[in-house]
Amino acid sequence: MKIGDLINVATGERKYLDAREREAFKKAAAFAPPDARTVAMLIFYTGCRIGEALELTPDRLDYDHGRVILRTFKQHRGQKVKPDKFRYVELPETFMAGLESQYKARSRRGTKTGSKPLWPFTIRTAQKYIKAIMTDAGIDGRRATARGLRHSMGVNLALHKTPIHLIADILGHESLSSTRIYMEILGDDRRDVIAAVW
């Protein structure tokens, strides 16, 4: 990753949601239809890629430890295909409870339907759901996407002084060089970090 992945260097437009926009997105998602809300909030809480979210099955929800098990995409660029790599990402208890309430996810674990994805729709449909929530939240431009949610998670973790190796693990980065971009705090986010020590 490079700086152009987080900000349009020609226009200065951010490609991630700031703290205010994250809060607006969360509020707007609360009023979205259940499938739209849950897939969008999984990306919001984990920073996972949209395809990783759509693979989620009840069997990959670890209710005992309050986390999700995600199969990591994009770790084989220019190399031989590697075996599947999985990562754990913690989730709020209320979100885990919501998945049980909406999809009976915990009850389906270990059954025939436990290995079937929670959301039986395409990436394109998920993108439309996320775009609609962004519109309702008053968010537009390049950041009003699933990737904008993913990047906002990385930036948010960096702003909260999360160790770089943990950010890499949460986002499923194979190399820390992909993660370092989130340490390059930009614009108002940078000012907020500096202002905290004034």
Image (cartoon, rainbow, N blue to C red):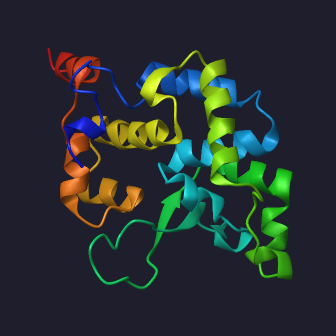
- Taking the spot 29% from the left edge, 47% from the top edge, the residue there is 162
Is 36 or 131 nearer to us in this picture? 131
Q: Is residue 101 rendered to the left or right of residue 63?
A: right
Question: Vertically, is 148 above or below 175?
Answer: above
- Quadrant in the rendering for residue 57: bottom right
- Quadrant in the rendering for residue 143: top left
- Taking the spot 18% from the left edge, 36% from the top edge, the residue there is 184
Q: Position of residue 192 (x, y in %)?
A: 26, 19
- Quadrant in the rendering for residue 24: top right
The total number of labels drawn is: 0
Is 121 or 32 nearer to us in this picture? 121
Q: Is residue 7 rendered to the left or right of residue 134?
A: left
Question: Vertically, is 181 above or below 19?
Answer: below
Q: Position of residue 135 (x, y in %)?
A: 62, 21
Q: Position of residue 170 (x, y in %)?
A: 40, 57
- Taking the spot 27% from the left edge, 79% from the top edge, the residue there is 79
Q: Is residue 104 rendered to the left or right of residue 47?
A: right
Is 75 or 46 nearer to us in this picture? 75
Q: Position of residue 10 (x, y in %)?
A: 22, 22
- Taking the spot 14% from the left edge, 14% from the top edge, the residue there is 198
Question: Vertically, is 85 above or below 31?
Answer: below
Q: Is residue 159 rendered to the left or right of residue 127?
A: left
